[in-house]
Image: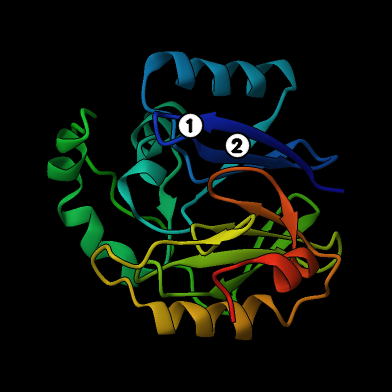
Amino acid sequence: MITIKTFPFNPFMVNTYLLFDETLEAIVVDAGCSDRREEKELEDFVTKHSLKLVRNINTHCHIDHILGNLFLEERYGLKPEHHPAGEPFLLRAKEIGAAYGFSVPRIPAPGPALYDGEVIAWGKSELKVLYTPGHADGSCCLYSKEQSFVLTGDVLFRDSIGRTDLPSGDFDLLMRSIHEKLFTLPDHTIVYPGHGPETTIGYEKLNNPFIG
């Protein structure tokens, strides 16, 4: 059974998720740790619970979601995994990071690419990749059918959606992603977003003011 630990990291309060099961193998989703204190918080939890980090997944490649990639590579030897359509964001990551006051000395080379329908496996657990562009090219959600939850990155939030005024943002495409990939999931599916509190698919269908 997958256990989910949430770390709100960096000034953008990105929900960095650590997922592990009874094998003690673990994956990190959206490593947003931006300074030594946050890196240590993640590292201390891993050490305390005797976890073995085996994969580093990015739901998309906006700067606030990738700040911890270098730490995970240097400390645990993990290459970041993301959809290849997000790679153009990495080309300007140092410049964008500096604009927000973040030091980005190096962008790690990516590991295996993620594609729609692919299964991310570790330990005795797995997540299905759902390709959901609209907030940003390369945006993916990660779905557990067995435990009825989905990690939505910046696609869907409680009572909100991802902004579409940044490069490659497309409101109509985002709506299509939400309706076709997320709102087809069972209503009781728990949503773990990239920022803010948890919600459910059923709640957002009924209450999200941005979705028609």
Q: Is residue 115 left or right of residue 124?
A: left
From the viewer's side, name the closer residue of 69 and 109.
Answer: 69
Do the CB atoms of the residues marked 1 and 2 lie less than 8 Å apart?
yes
Q: Is residue 125 left or right of residue 74?
A: right
20 lies above or below 206: above
Residue 170 quadrant: bottom left
Q: Residues within 10 Å of mark 2 (few under 14, many from 20)?
A: many
Identify the residue shown where x is 58% and y is 75%.
211
Q: Which residue is mark 2?
A: 53
Residue 127 quadrant: bottom right
Q: Is residue 117 left or right of residue 163?
A: right
Measured Cα–Cα span from mark 1 to mark 2: 7 Å
Q: Position of residue 11 (x, y in %)?
A: 39, 29
Q: Which mark is residue 76?
A: 1
Q: Position of residue 148 (x, y in %)?
A: 83, 63
Identify the residue shown where x is 42% and y is 84%.
172
Q: Amino acid at mark 1?
A: Tyr
89 lies above or below 77: below
From the viewer's side, name the closer residue of 107 and 161.
Answer: 161
- Image quadrant holding the C terminus, namely bottom right
Q: Secondary structure at mark 1?
A: helix
Q: Secondary structure at mark 2?
A: strand
157 lies above or below 71: below
Q: Earlier in the sequence, mark 1 or mark 2?
A: 2
